[in-house]
Image (cartoon, rainbow, N blue to C red):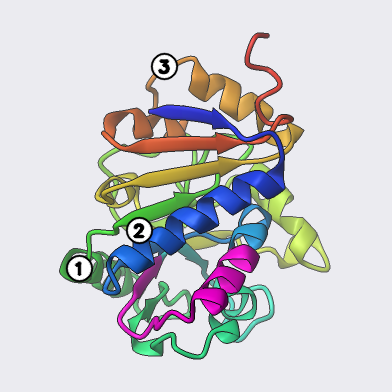
Amino acid sequence: MKFINLGTEKEACHYVANELLKQIITDNKSVLGLATGGTMVGVYEQLVNLIKINKLDLSNITTFNLDEYIGIDSDHPESYYTYMHDILFNHLSSWNEEKIHLPHGSANDLNSEVERYENLIDKEGPMDIQILGIGENGHIGFNEPGTSFDSLTSVVDLTESTIEANSRYFETKEEVPKQAISMGIQSILKAKRIILLAFGPKKAEAIQKLLSGEITTDLPASALYNHPNVEIIVDNSAYSNKES
């Protein structure tokens, strides 16, 4: 596992956007594992610009998103389907919608849906690059503390701290979904390469715990130590507690 402090959020986003660009150029049939949230906005903005500059055809690129809320439709303004289309997919006309995959959080049969999604990952994957954020409590995807490292795509209950953190995207905290469909930790570890980003002082404690090297289900991100090709990309404020 490599820890890299790139100083600023802008530089970190630039690095990850470049790595995704290089992967697409290297293999125009790449499979990308994508994430949502505020951490990823700068990555996607820069990636859109780089793809436009290089006039790349994305029609054979396959994408898988980590998760989706349960209880809201895909056209809800705070669904991850909406997020991905608003931030990334709608800005580049050559994406093939049939190759864009997110869990269906409004599926009638959630058990069938999680099985369908995991099977699709196995059929179309593995991901060449999986990008991740990290929660303040160390979660990756929506795999909260205590999640088994053997977990596959499943329905998960969100912790109070995660609901609180996500409430800034909703008008009221009560509107935040309490459950989601999330790739499991084992699902994430199937990727060939993993890049985790963490920005800001609110992520410093989780990064400090990850830097300790202890592998524990209390810190889901520590499962990444079990993968051979992981980079942790941070800015100064997320790395500030390194020596404390």
Q: Is residue 180 magenta?
A: no
Image: 163 above or below 179: above
- Let me know if residue 34 appears in the view: yes
- On-image quarter of the C terminus: top right
SS under mark 2: strand
Q: Between marks 1 and 3, how big is the CA–CA gap?
A: 31 Å
Q: Residue 241: horizontal and vertical position, in percent?
A: 68, 18
Q: Which residues are magenta?
A: 44-64
Q: Which residue is mark 3?
A: 214
Residue 52 image position (x, y, % from top left): 56, 79
Q: Residue at x 49, y 14 (%)?
A: 212
Q: In the rendered view of the protein, which quadrant contains the N terminus? A: top left
Name the spot of residue 56 as percent of width and height, x first: 43, 79
Which residue lies at the image location 33% right of the left edge and 50% below the top edge? 188
Q: Amino acid at mark 2?
A: Ser
Extreme-right residue of the structure: 171
| Residue 119 - label | 1
Q: Nearer the viewer, residue 217 or 160?
A: 217
Instruction: Name the amino acid type tagged 1.
Output: Asn
| Front in this rendered view, residue 145 or 46 | 46
Q: Earlier in the sequence, mark 2 or mark 3?
A: 2
User: Residue at label 2?
Assistant: 154
In the image, farthest residue toward the left = 123
Q: Is residue 15 left or right of residue 214?
A: right
Q: Image quadrant of residue 60?
A: bottom left
Residue at point 67%, 28% (across, down): 204
Q: Disc 1 or 3, which lies upstream in sequence?
A: 1
Badge 3, how many Cα within 10 Å: few under 14, some, many 20+? few
Say few, some or many: other residues with alpha carbon within 10 Å of mark 1 (under 14 / 14 to 19 / 20 or more).
few
Nearest the viewer among 157 and 220 is 220
Label 1 sits on a secondary structure element that is helix
**Numbered disc total:** 3
